[in-house]
Image (cartoon, helix red, strand yellow):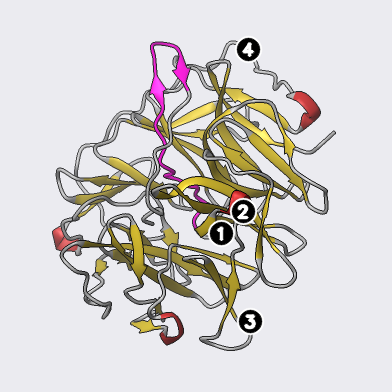
Amino acid sequence: MTMGKRRWVWGCLMLMLVFGACEWTSPTYPTQRPPLPTARRVTPLQSATPQPTLSPTPWPTATITPEPAPHGLVYQVLPIRAEVIPGQPLWLQTTTDGTLWLVTDKAVLRLRTDQKWWLPYLQGYPGKVIGIDDRWRVWVWDEEAQEVRCWDSNNWTHFGKDQGWLPVQGEVRPHLWTDATGGLWVMTDGDVRRLDGSRWSVYTPSSLGMREVGAEETLTLQLIYWPERKQMWLGSCVWAGPQAVRGAGLRWFDGKDWQPEPALEQECVLNMAVAQGRLWLAGMGTVYVSSLTEQGAFEKQRIQTGPSGLKPAYVLDFAFAQDGSAWGVVALCGGASCDSVRAVYRLRDDGEWQALGEVNPFLIQVVHNGLDDSIWALGQDRLYRYPVGGDGFQTLPPLHMIMVTEDQHSGQVWVLAVENKQPGLWSLGKEE
């Protein structure tokens, strides 16, 4: 999982969930291009806009007792019932203090510290939640009003044209980053935006000197924060229909201006991660890893042919274990598509990525479970566990995955899933 983005997991992972009267069914996962990414810390401007009234969710009449699942590898923490959780769950997120947040289409809730109940934080909001920052502020994009606003548990703060927020072409991606100076970053379909505390700056590809895109082409962008260098990095890829054809430029932000990265200026960047103090870039059939000592130097790693001779496309998601090993879900080219089938890969000692096990069209991501230093491959219909240093994946009983997030500090992995048509919050645990 992208280290800089999971934290959010990600979200945002092409997910659809059908919610019935009191019954959920598992979602479908459409094939799509790599995620168009998408920050955290500001001193807001105060607004006189009327504030919504928070209506507390009823407290449970009895304490819910977690029930361990087979092998003790996965255990349910908390059922999610329609009478408790308002609206349809959209995604999970953790903040750096370890708080787990649940965003629905009607409310934002946080998990109580004893993990026994959800506490309402914001009920009813105009627009689309794009993230919760580490100061517990909920950021909402209002497409109709063409502004972004944040809720600090008491007041709404609005940012519109007068504060530098320009109209958005397309969507604002549901992810937040915070840089070393406290700047808040968001990504839209066509640009990158930074809030310095009171005013937004909008960076378009043309303003960054990226190559122009043809009339029949589209441009996708990838954004990530590299804490060891205190830099934001922006990758690009130009598409002609369903085919990735070239990069439009690779840039990094030095705190004031964007700088080009000549070594990979022409490379198509489809995904990024930061781990082990290095930057990992997913290209077509390759992975580029930055040098620990030399600025601008990248090691090129080849992705081997997949099961059944399928050609590798790119790494959809990265994960990194405590022993330093690197893992990924790789999209494979089969038929007319280069994302119809997927497989789990591991980086070998010789610098090449090798497939493990069989192909699975429903693989979403890989995560590292810090509680027992194991790698989990997560699919729409199943969980796979690979003990680091083990001899293969363990396939667990069916569990329909909805969404996943990871606490980067504790290593805890949270899963929103459905079992026997009952949604619940699950936690990846240790093998007993």
Q: CA distance from mark 1 to mark 4?
A: 38 Å
Q: Position of residue 118 (x, y in %)?
A: 52, 28
Tell me the amino acid under the disc marked 1.
Met
User: Residue 91, located in which quarter of the rendered image?
Assistant: top left
Residue occupying the point 65% across, 17% down: 63
Going from N to C along the chain, the mark reached first, 2 or 3, is: 3
Q: Is residue 7 magenta?
A: yes
Q: Quadrant of residue 166?
A: bottom left
What residue does disc 4 label? 62
Magenta portion: prevailing SS class: loop
Label 2: element kind: loop
Is residue 196 positioned above or below 412 on the image? below
Q: CA distance from mark 2 to mark 4?
A: 32 Å
Residue type pointed to by label 4: Ala
Q: Residues within 10 Å of mark 1 (few under 14, many from 20)?
A: many
Give, as a single range, the part of the protein colored magenta: 5-25
Q: CA distance from mark 2 to mark 1?
A: 8 Å
Q: Is residue 354 above or below residue 379?
A: below
Sequence-first tag of 3 and 1:
1
**Is 218 placed left or right of 233 in the picture?**
left
On the image, the x and y values in percent for residue 378 come to: 60, 40
Task: State the mark number for residue 292.
Answer: 3
**Taking the image as drawn, is residue 40 in sight?**
no
Q: Which residue is mark 2?
A: 408
Query: In this figure, which residue is indicated by the disc labeled 1?
Result: 3
Question: Does residue 379 lie above or below 408 as drawn?
Answer: above
